[in-house]
Image (cartoon, rainbow, N blue to C red):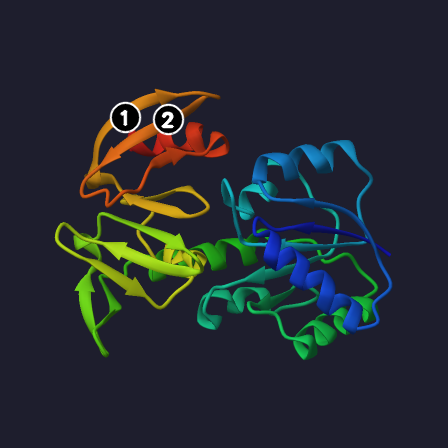
Amino acid sequence: MHILIIEDEPRAANQLQSILKLCSFEYQLVDIIDTVEDAVQWFQEHKTPDLVFMDIQLADGLSFEIFQKIDVAAPIIFTTAFDQYAIQAFKVNSVDYLLKPIQKDELNKALDKFLKSNKSATVDPAILKQLLSSMQIANKREGILVKEGSGFVQIKISDLLYMYSEESITFGVTSGKRYIIDETMDQLFNSLDHDQFFRINRGQIIAKNSIQKIDSYFNHRVKLSISNPKDQEFIVSRQKTSDFKEWLNR
């Protein structure tokens, strides 16, 4: 059984492999890919694997973009940090998903479903459209709960200048304060308005109105000057530079 893992977080990819072994699932890992761009190229150059584990949020965008650029005939099991209401569109036919953090029992169920299926679990465009519609509804979020002292307060999404992850803790920064956000970067970004917020790299999300200056940086990247930087350096990853420039022109 040849499997491909498309996942931009090394820890998550390693965890998935560890749980697969606990499930007594015999497989050969053919590759681990972390971007949409590399995934498209891989499918063009390699034989279709027997099964693909695919994260929804990758280093350079949503994995759904892969299906817009190339036909993928392999069965897919999606892995995601989305809330369950946003991914009901996947729970049909032989397409399946796993919520992070992945649990052994849930992985076993997904594998059993895959092994019993006699047809390829290709992604139905109607399902993809339904999911994207659910995501657009989620992106209308206006407030966010953050930690303050021993309790919580709600702040406006529009007040956030940027968010970043440090030692597995997510922080949100406004013009006057830094807050701890009890969400992963994936969960947070997937709930934001993507016309106003951009994930410039794996660990940083910036608001469009926080950008003060854009400079060229080596290796075809760009460096940003952001309001209230708090010792942070903001460099758009090479994979995302083109999309970032397009985002600025919206």
Q: Earlier in the sequence, mark 1 or mark 2?
A: 1
Residue 40 picture quarter: top right
From this view, report whether residue 54 is shown above or below residue 212.
below
Q: Residues within 10 Å of mark 1 (few under 14, many from 20)?
A: few
- Residue placed under numbered mark 2 in the picture: 222
Q: Nearer the viewer, residue 90 or 45?
A: 45
In the picture, the quarter occupied by the C terminus is: top left
* Amino acid found under the numbered disc labelled 2: Val
From this view, report whether residue 35 is shown above or below residue 172.
above
Describe residue 66's horizontal placement relative to residue 157 as left or right: right
Residue 159: horizontal and vertical position, in percent? 16, 54
Describe residue 77's horizontal placement relative to residue 187 as left or right: right
* Amino acid found under the numbered disc labelled 1: Ile
Describe residue 231's horizontal placement relative to residue 124 as left or right: left
Describe residue 156's horizontal placement relative to residue 32 as left or right: left
Secondary structure at badge 1 equals strand
Task: Look at 63% across and 68% down and name the residue there.
Answer: 92
Q: Nearer the viewer, residue 30 or 152?
A: 152
Residue 26 picture quarter: bottom right
Residue 245: horizontal and vertical position, in percent? 36, 28
Q: Nearer the viewer, residue 119 or 111?
A: 111
For the image, the number of numbered tags is: 2
Q: Residues within 10 Å of mark 2 (few under 14, many from 20)?
A: many
From this view, report whether residue 71 is shown above or below residue 181.
above
- Residue placed under numbered mark 1 in the picture: 214
Task: Look at 59% across and 36% down and name the residue there.
Answer: 69
Q: Disc 1 vs disc 2: Cβ atoms closer than 8 Å?
A: yes
Residue 241: horizontal and vertical position, in percent? 42, 29
